[in-house]
Amino acid sequence: MELHLVRDFGTGDIETIEISPAVLEIEVEPRMAGEADRILMVHSVPGRFAYITGPYPGRFCVEIGESGDLDRIGEALLEITELSGGSPPPYAVRDLYRRREETIVRKETDTIEDEIALGLYDDEDL
């Protein structure tokens, strides 16, 4: 199994409330595509993430939003990795946690700075 971060979490603009989702590409051997698809389907609803199959058998794109359950995503990745007898990338989910938290903090900071620039606060609010 191979993982690629296609798009990182983003802050969007002032009118966007949540951060923009990250997209993770998962690539497995084509013979395991059906089972990997089943694993992602089972985990996607309780894990609050969306996925689509790629243009080639064995490729999947997973969209992970602000409220996505990264533990569930980690469980799905572990199960997919076990299909081929491999071991999961050691820091993949931990890195996603860190990236998401950093983006949330950056989004909150940007929002406050934008609101101050727009004059939404009086001097006494600062």
Image (cartoon, rainbow, N blue to C red):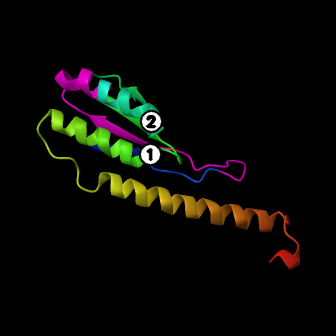
Position of 75 with respect to 103 (left or right) is left
Q: Is residue 36 visible?
A: yes
Position of 21 with respect to 124 (left or right) is left
Residue 23 sits above or below residue 39 on the image: below
Residue assigned mark 2: 46
Q: Kindly indicate whether the residue at mark 2 contacts the one at mark 1 (C-beta within 8 angstroms).
A: yes
| Nearer to me, 47 or 116 | 47
The amino acid type, in three-letter code, at marker 1 is Asp
Residue assigned mark 1: 69
Q: Is residue 50 visible?
A: no
Q: Residue at x 44, y 36 (%)?
A: 46
Q: For marks 1 and 2, give the CA distance.
A: 8 Å
Q: Which residues are magenta?
A: 13-37
Image quarter where the N terminus lies is top left
Helix, strand or loop for disc 1: loop
Q: Residue at x 56, y 46 (%)?
A: 20
The amino acid type, in three-letter code, at marker 2 is Pro
Residue 71 sits above or below residue 35 on the image: below
Determine the image quadrant of residue 58: top left
Residue 77: x and y, percent? Answer: 28, 41
Q: Residue at x 23, y 50 (%)?
A: 89
Mark 2: few, some, or many residues within 10 Å (few <14, many ≥20)? few
Determine the image quadrant of residue 104: bottom right
- The answer to if 83 sits in the magenta stretch is no
